[in-house]
Amino acid sequence: MDDPNKNKLNIISVLKRTITIPIQRWKPLSLALIPSGIAMLVLDLVYVFGIVPDNSVTGSIYFILYSILLVIFAITCHRNILMGGGSTTKYGVLKWSYREWRYAGWAFIAYFYLYAFAALGMFFASTLSSIIPGCNSTMFFIAFLAIAMLPGIYVFARLSILFPATAIEHKTTWNWAWDITEGNGWRLVIIVGLFPALLSLVPAFLSGINLAMDIVLLIAGLILLAVEIIALSVSFNELTKDHQPQIAESG
């Protein structure tokens, strides 16, 4: 039996390809992502900037619609990177099918673990900050929270390989994800955890300056989201390259 985890991720190589692939294929990739991207941008503008009332009903509607659009955006991106432009219409995925339900299901499971550990981390950080003398500052709270959340981020990182696999309609299971990422868990933490966190730092510091800047940051956020999805697609391709289709190099 072949060892499924013999492909060790080269983080530098993954990040290089994450940058070069969208540069090489920017036109077809942009065209495919524009419909869902614009819809997500409009939804943000309508809700985040107070065009509609901010209450539990509108918040729930926003969450559901944004989640649907995010799944479509992500699947469009994964398929275009892993299978080439012909894997979707010119304007990306335009319908919801069983594939999208499966993707949403795996996303729910992965994010459930992430947020469950985040909740435990909040409790852990609050408790330690209050009972350890001299550790009741914000700095210690953040440090305790980060340590407590690491297991959740680790589980999420290893399960995240299910996203590109599901997007290209491979039959996958929890065990498959765990096996294929064995030996690469912390590498994936860097790629799907640390890398996105670093990308989000600049938008976080610049938000709230004025409306025009916030709109620019929303657009930049969509671009960074695509980059993060591409990084996961490249990681999937590297981990499965001996028995899965390679990334299409042409648009």
Image (spheres, rainbow, N blue to C red):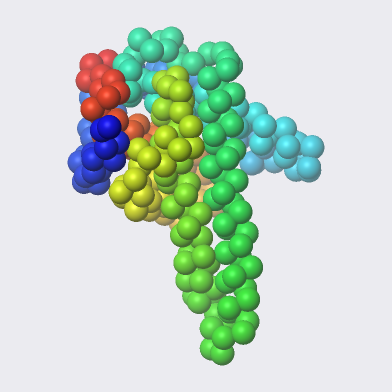
- Write the residue at 56% across / 90% down: 133
Residue 206: x and y, percent? 46, 53
16, above or below 123, in the image: above
- Write the residue at 53% across / 28% down: 103
Quadrant of the rendering where the N terminus is positioned = top left
Q: Is residue 231 left or right of residue 64?
A: left
41, above or below 160, in the image: above
How many numbered discs?
Answer: 0
- Closer to the camera in the image, 209 or 111: 111
Residue 226, by quadrant, is top left
Quadrant of the rendering where the C terminus is positioned = top left
Residue 209: x and y, percent? 52, 52
Q: Is residue 90 left or right of residue 113?
A: left
25, above or below 135, in the image: above
- Write the residue at 72% across / 32% down: 61
- Write the residue at 46% across / 28% down: 172
Q: Residue furthest bottom?
A: 133
Inspect this view and state whether residue 203 appears.
no
43, above or below 85, in the image: below
Residue 57, by quadrant, is top right
Inspect this view and state whether residue 192 appears.
yes
Residue 129: x and y, percent? 58, 79
Residue 97: x and y, percent? 58, 15
Q: Residue furthest front?
A: 1
- Closer to the camera in the image, 28 or 81: 81
